[in-house]
Amino acid sequence: MTAKYIFFTGGVVSSVGKGVTAAAVGRLLKQRGFKVAVQKLDPYINVDPGTMSPYQHGEVFVLDDGAETDLDLGHYERFIDVRLNKVCNITTGQVYAEVIGAERRGDFLGGTIQVVPHITNEIKRRISLVAKTTGAEIVLVEVGGTVGDIESLPFIEALRQLRTDLGRENTVYVHVTWLPFIGATEELKTKPTQHSVRELRSYGISPDMIVARSDSPIDESIREKIAQFCDVEKRAVIPMVTEPILYEIPLLLEKAKVGDYLLERLNLTQPHKPDWTAWEKLVKETKRKKPKVSIALVGKYVELHDAYISVRESLKHAALSLGVELDLKWVHSADIEKGRCQDILESVNGIVVPGGFGSRGIEGKIQAAHFARINQVPYFGLCLGMQMMVIEFGREVLANEDVNSSEFDRSTANPVIDLMPDQQGITEKGGTMRLGLYPCVLQPGTIACKAYGKDLVEERHRHRFEFNNNYRELFSENGMKFSGLSPDGRLVEIAELTNHPFMLGTQFHPEFLSRPTRPHPLFIAFMRAACIKAGIPFNDPPEILEP
C-alpha cells in the first residue's frame, strides 16, 4: 500500500510540543495496528546536532546506525517503541551538502541550481526514504521551528508540493499552536493562532487539524472560535493542556478521538481496536503516591534539563517498574569542585554521572565517584561517567593524582582513559566518533550479567576515548571487574567494582534504549540498589509492561 503522511508544523512560539504531539499520535496509530515511523526536519545548517553544545540544542540522541540526531527522535522511539534510522532526521545542512555535491559532480550541467525545484526535490526524496527503509505504512513528519522562520521555508514548500504529488487522501497537515493566557483579562487569546494559520496559508498549506496548546483549560467557545476563523472542523481542533505526565498525552488524544479522525481523513481501516491497558496502567502507576528514592544526577549541563532527557526518563521508567517514585536532584559538577553540594550527595540514595565532553567540571564528577565508592552509595556511570569512575579508582590504586584521561591531560603519565586506536589522526569533529549499535559480551556472575539475564547484548555508543588496556590487569587485581567486553575482548564496555553494592559504568549509552513499558535492565538494577540503600521496599521482580 502507498504510505500515508501526517505533517506537523508549529505556530506562535517554538518549543510548543510538536515532538511530543507527533510521538503521541504515532502511539495512537501503532495501537491500532499500523507500522509507524517518524521523521524530524531540522532547519539549521549544521549537518547534524553532534557538534552542538547541549546548551544550544539539548541532548544528542543516537540511533542504531550511528546517526546523531535531534532529541525529538528520543520522544518518538520512547512513545512508539520503534527503532528509527538515519533518514529519520533531515537538516538543511544535509540537504544543501547533497545538492551542492551533485552540482560539483556535474549532475546539473547547464542548469541553474535553485531552492525550487532542486532543494525541495531533495527534501521530498529524503522524506520518501523513510517508508522505503522502515516499511512504515504511516510516516509522521515534524518540521522544526515555527511557521514564518526564514530557514523553514524550503521544508514548508516541500510539504506543500507533497500534497499535490501524493494526493489529499494520503496527506494530513497538523498545526500545533500556543494559546497565551492574558492575566489582566483572565482569558486565552486565539489571535496568535489565527495569524499563524494565515501565515501558513500564505505558503499554500491549510491545516486539517489544529492542536491548541495551553497552560490553562480550553473551553468549547475557544475551540469553536478557532474552528470558525481558521476554517477547520471543530472536531479537528484538539485542546492540549500542559500535563505533568508526558505519557498521559496519548490517552488524552485518544479521548479526543484524534486517531479516529486521522484514519477517516486518510481513508484507512484499522487492523484492530487499540488496547490501552498497559499504557493506562503506566499512567496510573505514575500518579500513585509512592515512596521516594533520591538520585543525584551530576552533570555539566544541568541548567538545561533537556541535555539529559533520556537519562531522566530512563530513571523514571525503572523507578515505576519497581513501584517507587524518582526524586531527582540536579547537581552541577562544577559546584562540587567548589566544595558545594556535599549535603546533597550525603542525602541521596544513588548517584548518576552521565556523558559529556571537555574538561570543564571533570574533577567534580571524579569527586562524585569518589564519594560513591568510599560511602558505598550506588553509582551508575554512563560513558564519560564510566571513565570518571575508572580515573577515580586509578588514583586510589596507583596512589597518584596524575592518573587521568588523555582527553583532559595529554601529558599525563597514567592515561587510564585514552584515545581509541581507530580515532588516531582524525581531525574532523562531526560524525567521526564510535557511533551506533555494537555487541557486548557479558561475563558470568557479574552485576551486569545478572541484570541483563543473558550473556550477549547490543547497545548504542557515542565516544572517542576508551579504557586503556595497559591497566586492565592491575585494575582487575585490585577489585575492578570488566564485566562487559567487545566480542574480540579488545574494548572494555562495562566496568564494575567487586567490593561495592553497585558501582558500575558503561562505555555505551543504555538510556537510548529504555522504554516506559520496558525499562532498561541496568537502570532497574541501579534503582533497585538505590532502594536497598534507602531501606525502601520495591517490586522484585520489577513489573515490566508489554508495549
Image (tube, rainbow, N blue to C red):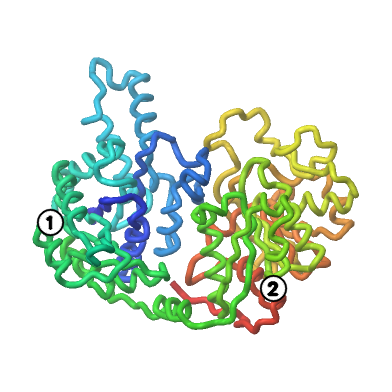
Q: Which mark is residue 102?
A: none
Q: Earlier in the sequence, mark 2 or mark 1?
A: 1
Mark 2–mark 1 Cα distance, whole angstroms, equals: 54 Å
The residue positioned farthest toward the front in the image shown? 184
Does residue 502 appear to the left or right of 397 in the view shown?
left
Left-right relation of 333 to 102:
right
- Which quadrant: the N terminus? bottom left
In the image, residue 538 lies at what x, y percent?
Answer: 62, 82
Place residue 193 in its image quadrant.
Answer: bottom left
Q: Give residue 78's quadrant in the image.
A: bottom left
Q: In the picture shown, does residue 52 fall above or below 40?
A: above
With respect to residue 484, does 524 lie above or below?
Answer: below
Q: Amino acid at mark 1?
A: Cys
- Callout 1 crowding tier (Cα within 10 Å): few <14, some 14–19, many ≥20: many
For residue 230, which numbered disc appears in the image?
1
The picture places residue 72, in percent across and down from the top left corner, at 41, 53
Q: Nearer the viewer, residue 456 or 430?
A: 430
**Foreground tag (2 vs 1):** 1
Closer to the camera in the image, 240 or 453: 240
What mark, if any, has residue 529 been given in the picture?
Answer: 2
| Residue shown at the point (24%, 67%) measured from the top left | 186
Residue in the picture at 26% in, 23% down: 113
Quadrant that contains the C terminus: bottom left
Decide if residue 410 is on the left or right side of residue 87.
right
- Looking at the image, which residue is at 70% across and 52% down? 365
Indicate the position of residue 479 as horizontal and vertical percent values: 85, 60
Residue at point 12%, 63% (across, down): 225
Q: Position of residue 433 (x, y in %)?
A: 59, 39
Kindly tell me whether residue 4 is visible in this rendering.
no
Dot 1 lies on which element? helix
Q: Secondary structure at mark 2?
A: helix
